[in-house]
């Protein structure tokens, strides 16, 4: 990476009671009565130990990590013991944590801004997380429960840690939606498996770098640009404004919609119709007033700027109006690889906005294919 090493903001939530009923044959740990029964039968919590295995994978990189978590057994105690820089949010009644604590922790971590929420638990914990965070917040589960039917968990705690390690190291890690499922524990105890779908979460997965390729595993630029464009067009909201920045990658999007493109300028699109070509900052603010707004950009120049180089028409005011969740970054994996691990750059001219934009962002790299990639601060 260029410049100073970027700090990875890792949110951590441990459900300290996850899986407590498994060893004593209770087939779950949902509900206070089951937890009390498990403890009375001599069950010993093990979620912290499984989280320790996950975090051990990133110990060599802990100087690059700021760990944000909840008090004591929900993450603070383990994180401090392992030597991480820790910021503690919220309050709990130690020894009497509940699902409400998990949900509150997830909401607060998303609100303060973390690159990833790592959580330890089972399907009940995944349901709590799903209930609390938005669709753009990346999360990853450390399996610690009796029931692990949800697709948001790594196969092992160490595998979860390895995914986090790759993110911290700046490797290309695919990110995709995964299902949250849970079963009826009462039915399960009676020998009936009855699973239910509760929603989706955005989850990073290592080693899923599939792409339309030819010999040698290299991307075919034209096909990949078509894939990126097709996926983004499918996601476009009716009546919403789309500000499309300069670049050959964004030109592929315009061409897929059959629209003229300003290669070195900024265009405005609504319902796949061109409203303004080569628009100024003032025009973009005026034309999008009061409407839902998305901004589509790609990496510009050798340093990989997504704001502040070649697209000054996309003003800080326009970015704030759209909101970070409505920024769509598109790039081929080959283009990202050319950055050599350096982060994408932002240099809007407003340090507070640059700081808000830094972190890890979802970069669309194909049809329904995306990676998490670091964003740093422009160096001028």
Image: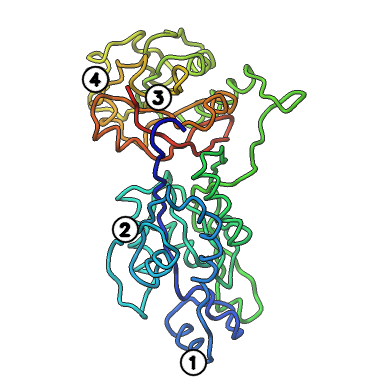
Residue located beneath label 3 in the image: 306
- Give above or below for 110 relative to 94: above
Q: Badges 3 and 1: C-beta atoms under 8 Å apart?
A: no
- Alpha-carbon distance for marks 2 and 3? 30 Å
The reply, left or right, for residue 109 in relation to residue 39 is: left
Residue located beneath label 2 in the image: 87
Q: Badges 2 and 3: C-beta atoms under 8 Å apart?
A: no
Q: Residue at x 52, y 53 (%)?
A: 60
Disc 1 element: helix
Disc 3 element: strand
Which residue is outermost to the bottom?
40
Q: Which mark is residue 183?
A: none
- Give above or below for 184 relative to 213: below
- Alpha-carbon distance for marks 3 and 1? 56 Å
- Give above or below for 156 relative to 62: below
Q: Badges 1 and 2: C-beta atoms under 8 Å apart?
A: no
Residue located beneath label 4 in the image: 285
Local crowd size for mark 3, using a 10 Å CA cut-off: few (<14), some (14–19), many (≥20): many
Mark nearest the camera among 4 and 3 is: 3
Local crowd size for mark 1, using a 10 Å CA cut-off: few (<14), some (14–19), many (≥20): few
Mark nearest the camera among 3 and 1 is: 3
Q: Which mark is residue 40?
A: 1
Q: Residue at x 39, y 56 (%)?
A: 67
Local crowd size for mark 4, using a 10 Å CA cut-off: few (<14), some (14–19), many (≥20): some
């Amino acid at each position: 990476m260029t410049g100073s090493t970027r700090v990875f903001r890792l949110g951590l939530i441990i459900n300290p009671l996850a899986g407590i009923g498994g060893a004593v044959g209770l087939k779950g740990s949902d509900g206070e009565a089951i937890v009390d029964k498990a403890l009375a039968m001599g069950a010993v919590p093990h979620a912290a130990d499984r989280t320790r295995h996950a975090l051990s994978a990133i110990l060599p990189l802990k100087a690059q990590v700021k760990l944000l978590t909840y008090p004591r057994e929900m993450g603070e105690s383990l994180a401090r013991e392992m030597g991480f820089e820790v910021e503690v949010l919220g309050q709990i009644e130690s020894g009497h944590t509940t699902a409400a604590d998990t949900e509150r922790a997830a909401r607060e971590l998303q609100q303060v801004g973390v690159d990833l929420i790592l959580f330890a638990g089972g399907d009940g914990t995944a349901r709590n997380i799903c209930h609390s965070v938005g669709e753009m917040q990346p999360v990853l589960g450390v399996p610690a429960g009796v029931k692990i039917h949800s697709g948001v968990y790594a196969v092992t705690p160490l595998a979860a840690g390895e995914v986090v390690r790759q993110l911290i190291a700046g490797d290309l890690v695919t990110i995709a939606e995964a299902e949250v499922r849970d079963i009826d524990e009462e039915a399960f105890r009676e020998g009936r498996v009855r699973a239910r779908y509760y929603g989706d979460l955005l989850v990073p997965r290592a080693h899923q770098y599939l792409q339309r390729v030819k010999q040698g595993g290299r991307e075919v630029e034209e096909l990949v640009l078509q894939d990126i464009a097709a996926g983004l067009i499918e996601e476009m909201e009716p009546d919403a404004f789309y500000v499309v920045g300069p670049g050959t990658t964004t030109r592929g999007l315009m061409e897929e919609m059959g629209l003229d493109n300003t290669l070195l300028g900024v265009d405005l699109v609504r319902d796949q119709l061109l409203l303004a070509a080569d628009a100024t900052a003032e025009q973009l603010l005026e034309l999008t007033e009061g409407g839902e707004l998305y901004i589509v950009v790609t990496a510009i120049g050798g340093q990989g700027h997504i704001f502040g180089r070649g697209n000054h028409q996309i003003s800080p005011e326009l970015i704030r109006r759209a909101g970070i969740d409505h920024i769509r970054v598109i790039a081929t994996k080959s283009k990202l690889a050319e950055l050599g691990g350096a982060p994408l750059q932002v240099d809007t001219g407003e340090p507070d906005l640059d700081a808000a934009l830094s972190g890890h962002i979802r970069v669309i790299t194909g049809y329904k294919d995306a990676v998490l990639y670091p964003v740093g601060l422009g160096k001028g």
